[in-house]
Image (cartoon, rainbow, N blue to C red):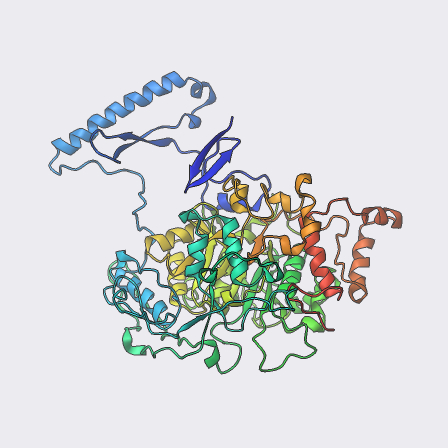
Amino acid sequence: MSFSTSRHGHQRTRSRLTIGIPHYTNSVVDEKFHLGGSQPRPWFNPISIPLPGAHKRALRLWIPNHRRLPPSLARKRGVIALLAAFAIVLYTIFAVTVRFGSAQKKWPASPWPTPSSRATVVYHDDDLRRIWQWEVMSGHYPSRRKLPQELNITTPPMNPALPPRKTSRDDANGTTIGVGSKRIYLDLQSQPPDVAYPPRPVPGAIADLDVILKYCDFAENKYVRDCLDVLRTGAGLDNGNRIRRGNLDDWQYIYFEKEAPKLVLQDALQFTALPATGKWEKLSLPPLQTYRPYPLLDSPCDPENPKIFHIFWGGPITDKPYTILMSFLYTQNTGLHLKSYPDNAPCRPQFWVWINPAPAATEPPPNALHDMFIELKENPWAAPFLHPRFKDVIKFKLWNTTEMLDGIPELKDEWRSMESLFKSGAHVLHVSEPELKKVTVDADATTTTTTTKAPPTEGAYNRLSTVLSDMARFILCHRFGGIYLDADTVLLRDWEELFNWRGAFAYRWSWHEKYNTAVLHMSKGSALGTFLFRTALNNGLDFHPMTVSVYTEQAYMQGLLLRLPDALFDPAWLNTEDYQRERPPQPFFTNFADFFDTPVSQGAAPQALGFDGFFSGAYSYHYHSPWVKPFDVSRNYPDLGERFVKGEEALKAASGKTEAEQEEDARDQRDLDWSTVVKRTFEAYVRGERPNMYGEWIQW
């Protein structure tokens, strides 16, 4: 059976009837969605009966769900329909009686939770307003989007991250008062004759996410294909391929600030602890953070806004963390094209790999650091990144749950008293506090350890690690700053302008108006972080993205944790769920598995277009990991040349295959998959056979 319908103005074709997110066998998407509270089918389903004479009004009723009945009874549709009709009549009589026969003269309240419920909110609206004001006045809201009307913020706060308007007429119309530097929007193009590679982003440049939302918001009927066109053109990634298309000034979304903003006084708000009233918690906030444009920093690296990528991983390093680290070297401004990095050069981003000893909540062994060196050195997928050339940009770190929880001021005094520590949506995993014995570990150490003897597998990976990672990403961003990434991600371009956008963001869960925190950016020590941790603490420490969506919605905080379009980080997702297939981006994936097993009909594209033809314009690609599927079937090892040949030889020897069998395996199939082309592109850069995507050659 097939049918077509339209959602948000997009043509949608489906080959089967489904509700919500489709099921992907052995998929992390499926796992995360079900962790988010997916329950057995409800006993009742809602129906709406139009009310005569009331335009766009309907009576909402609940009828029994026949799928919850025993099969023998469920097949008797006529009986069920009759019972449902009888129940509707009884409820209608009851409702009319209550409405017109009771003293209250009101329709009966629904026994089910309504979207307007605010059950997770722990702060009074006065304090929620204070959180908004703190974030805006600290420069964490560089946007002209309106403030939430529900909080009734009558005095617009001063915004040092926003330039003044030419007129003040709109400043009081639900927005903030811009007192920041003038924005200079950049026309980024490679200049002839050097047009073979795109230009690096200007150090200190900032992405105007209001402009990106204008062209990319799925809720406003924007296509991923068109969004990537804007992202690509506005950043100059089309380099020598730009053709005349008229005036594209409106596509400029990257700007630079030169002037100092107007000083925002610390005493503009009361930031000391306020007494708790009734069910509300008291709110304690630190002093305002000072917003300073890049040219006014004392050093190229801003300690309050560090350029750090984080990933969280349990078990030995495999080809998945290996590939995201390789993509980091290929796309980010690490300075590896320079023999020595000058002190006054742009701030170099770092990549921190947090490795969690297994099982997820046990105490790391006393010899953890020593074991780390042994295991990482012996692991062919990890050993290349221990090379001294990478020591300033890639760091392996030990995750210690107790030390991390104690490092969060909002949690340290109370988390031990919780009955359950690990909760994600509908799943609660019980781990006692004694299993979380504190180990003194330097959080800035570049060493770690792994004790798991097998990597995670599809359908059988450590659920505790999955749940823990939901919390870990918020801990890392709140404590250290930077951007968290899920490990099943490939970076596709420089993230300079996203790091410099001082607000917080995640991205949209496909067509749902919910968060996916596979990408998460937050300022360290922010008021938003305080809100999230205190709210989560009072709700079972649940950091599943669906639950976080509820926290922000009920407290009117969605604007402070911006939900970016998934086109920026997950550009295939809508297509895999049957949206926008009439105008897909390049490449066109109908399933996440197409990345690893590219369909024959599209098999010419990876080799013909190469890395530059893979979702060009997007910042990253999230492939929703099939953990056991290798990136490169015929070269399932780090193919990095003579400098790292020991790792290649070790994996070949471990396979137990003869030399003839290995030679047979090394023979490529006629059409290379996208995953293979992407991995081999990164490896060719490290081998010194090609420059990175910006035309820079690695220097050893």
Q: Residue at x 66, y 55 (%)?
A: 611
25 lies left or right of 262:
right
Front residue of 574/636: it is 574
Provide residue 609's location: percent of width, then percent of height.
67, 52
Does the image show residue 431? no
In-image side of 162 versus 49 (left or right) = right
Query: Can you say whether 328 is above or below 511 in the image?
Result: below
Q: Is residue 258 visible?
A: yes
Locate residue 159: give its quadrant.
bottom left
Q: Position of residue 523 (x, y in %)?
A: 45, 68
Number of numbered discs overlaid on the protein picture:
0
Q: Which residue occupies the extreme left position in the image? A: 103
In depth, the one of 549 and 370 nearer the eye is: 549
Q: Camera-side residue: 238 or 530?
A: 238
- Identify the residue at horizontal 72%, vertical 73% (top origin): 699
661 to the left or right of 219: right
Q: Residue at x 62, y 68 (%)?
A: 192
In the image, residue 305 lies at what x, y percent? 48, 72
| Residue depicted at x 80% and y 62% | 645
Left or right: 644, with 303 as reference point = right
Q: Relative to residue 500, is residue 317 depicted above or below?
A: above
Q: Quadrant of the C terminus?
A: bottom right
Q: Position of residue 227 (x, y in %)?
A: 50, 53
Would you identify the image quadrant in which residue 443 lies? bottom right
